[in-house]
Image (cartoon, rainbow, N blue to C red):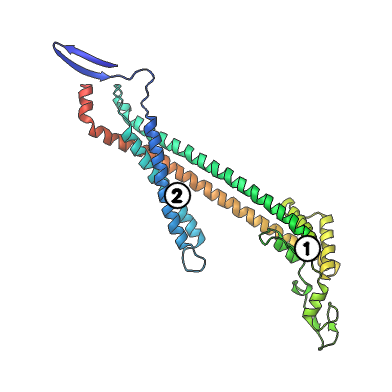
Amino acid sequence: MSDTAIIGEDVEVIGTGTTAGNTPFSWSAAIAGAFAATAVAFIIISLGSGIGLSMASPYSWGPSAKTLTIIGAVWLVMAHTFGFATGGYMAARLRSHSYDGMIDETRFRDAAQGFLVWSIGVVVMLAIAATTTLFAAGATAHVASGAAAGTGAAMSNPQNTASASDATGYFVDMLFRPRSASAGSPPAVSAAPGSATVGAGPAGPGAAGAVSSGQQRLDAESRAEVTRIVARGVAEGGLTEQDRSYLAQLVSQRTGLPQDEAQRRVTEVEGNAKETAKDAADKAAKAASFFSFWMFMSLLFGAAAATLGGIVGGDLRDKDSMPARDVAYR
């Protein structure tokens, strides 16, 4: 409603009050600012990704992975700062001034308008991240089902072997290496061409023949069983005594190692597998902690930039509309 004062024949507008249900916020301006902030941040992040990928090459001199990670984190903070500053400024400039007589609250409302832009932008980013996570989870499940089907096919076909990407495949290979390849076990030595070989291997033309004759090829079904045992042992923090004895027996049968030496090999491989899993878990925890900290910093700087952008945009808006406001409040 408009409050008017009638003095003689002159009619002058004193103030324009807000009607019931109106709000000093402009949701359309806030949504527009949030979309603008997201677009600007995406452009800056895309530029930084392109620069970083062009510099990250393991075959040329350049910044280390740690340096690139720190630069990327700082770039993320800068992207959120510029993006939300743009969104807050735009939302405040697009918001109409509410002439409700509360002039001192104008700057606070502009700051709140910018903060609203940041809030909407964060919700949009969370929705995008959740959608991406669900898509990745579905893709992972699909790959896992395909891997399970491939494992079944490998077990039915002795010519197939475990996938090279199997996390425990390397440790299974360590268990069943030939005697000459194990640490502390010297290779068999042939005394003379055509004579019996001196060493642990049977008679043959040389050391290679001794190794090949003492090594029995591990079939796909047995390899899959050993892989499951090793994977469970790593997940549970160690092999059970029963599994350890069973693996030592298999290693002794397949490689020709004595039982005590096979037992030591199983213990060594178990320790290496546990240490590798621990290192991987520590690196994942550090990476998650690093990402969480810098995400917090980027969102904090984004909130401050959106709030300050709203204040600056509101001041410039009021500066351009100062004559009209003076007439309205006169």
Q: Position of residue 228 (x, y in %)?
A: 76, 55
Q: Amino acid at mark 2?
A: Leu
Q: Is residue 216 left or right of residue 97?
A: right
- Labels 1 and 2 touching (C-beta < 8 A): no
Residue position marked by numbered label 1 in the rendering: 158
Residue pictured at 85% horizontal, 81% vertical: 203
Relative to 48, say whether 10 is above or below.
above
Sequence-wise, the earlier of marks 1 and 2 is 2
Relative to 253, say whether 242 is above or below.
above
Q: Is residue 46 left or right of residue 246?
A: left
Q: Amino acid at mark 1?
A: Pro
Q: Secondary structure at mark 1?
A: loop
Within 10 Å of the Cα at label 1, are there few (<14), some (14-19), or many (20+) other Cα atoms? few
Q: Position of residue 325 (x, y in %)?
A: 23, 26
Residue pictured at 37% horizontal, 22% vertical: 22
* Quadrant in which the C terminus appears: top left
Residue position marked by numbered label 2 in the rendering: 76
